[in-house]
Image (cartoon, grey):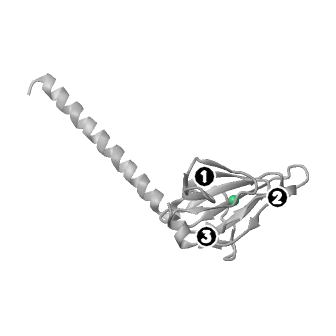
Amino acid sequence: MNKYIKTIAILTGSLFLITACNSNTEKNQENMKTDKNKLDAIFPKGEKGSADLFTGNAYNIGLVAPDSTFTTAVGNVYFEPRARSNWHTHPAGQILIITDGVGYHQIEGQPIEVIKKGDVVKCPPNVRHWHGASPDVGLQQLYIVPNTEKGIVDWQEAVTNEQYKKE
Ligand code: MN
């Protein structure tokens, strides 16, 4: 083998190794993502949500309690896979910031929207909607409810399995 061919062989070998390493890393990250216990939790898990308001296991922790200066409620909800809120409205709307996982958000009459880490979702005032995790991956979401003097949330009926499956 002359020097030139040898160099090409070494370079090709190195490229193959680099590619192989990258795809392993991607695979590992993928595996971590689909493990419900491996979602990144920025805030404490908080208290389990009532079965009257949520289907499945959802946990809520308040981070900012509304007061007369800020009139804003902020908190974090962790939904285990398949868990979701009941249908509800917010008198002054709501902003969701997804910090990990994959979930669903649906405004009544519209298709289910897939939401995932890095997404920001605005839900307008007094619009019926629900949000929660996807069937296989949980969801970590921050909520921001502005103008709480108008009210925070009006809870309604549960999202049926049939409604949940209609992706
Ligand atoms: Mn909401």
* Sequence-earlier tag: 1 or 3: 1
Question: Is residue 64 rendered to the left or right of residue 9?
Answer: right
Question: Is residue 7 rendered to the left or right of residue 91?
Answer: left
Q: Place residue 143 in its image quadrant.
A: bottom right
Residue at which label 2 appears: 65
Quick one: 64 or 14, which is closer to the camera? 64
Distance (Cα) linking label 1 and label 2 = 20 Å
Q: Is residue 113 above or below residue 60?
A: above
What label does residue 110 carry, if any? Answer: none
Query: Residue at 56% across / 50% down in the picture?
Result: 117
Q: Say whether mark 2 is within 8 Å of ligand 1.
A: no
CB-based contact (under 8 Å), mark 1 and mark 3: no
Q: Is residue 96 visible from the viewing direction of this image?
A: yes
Residue type highlighted by circle 3: Val
Q: Is residue 41 visible from the viewing direction of this image?
A: no
Distance (Cα) linking label 1 and label 3 = 23 Å
Q: Say whether mark 1 is within 8 Å of ligand 1.
A: no
Q: Residues within 10 Å of mark 1 (few under 14, many from 20)?
A: many
What label does residue 159 carry, if any? Answer: 3
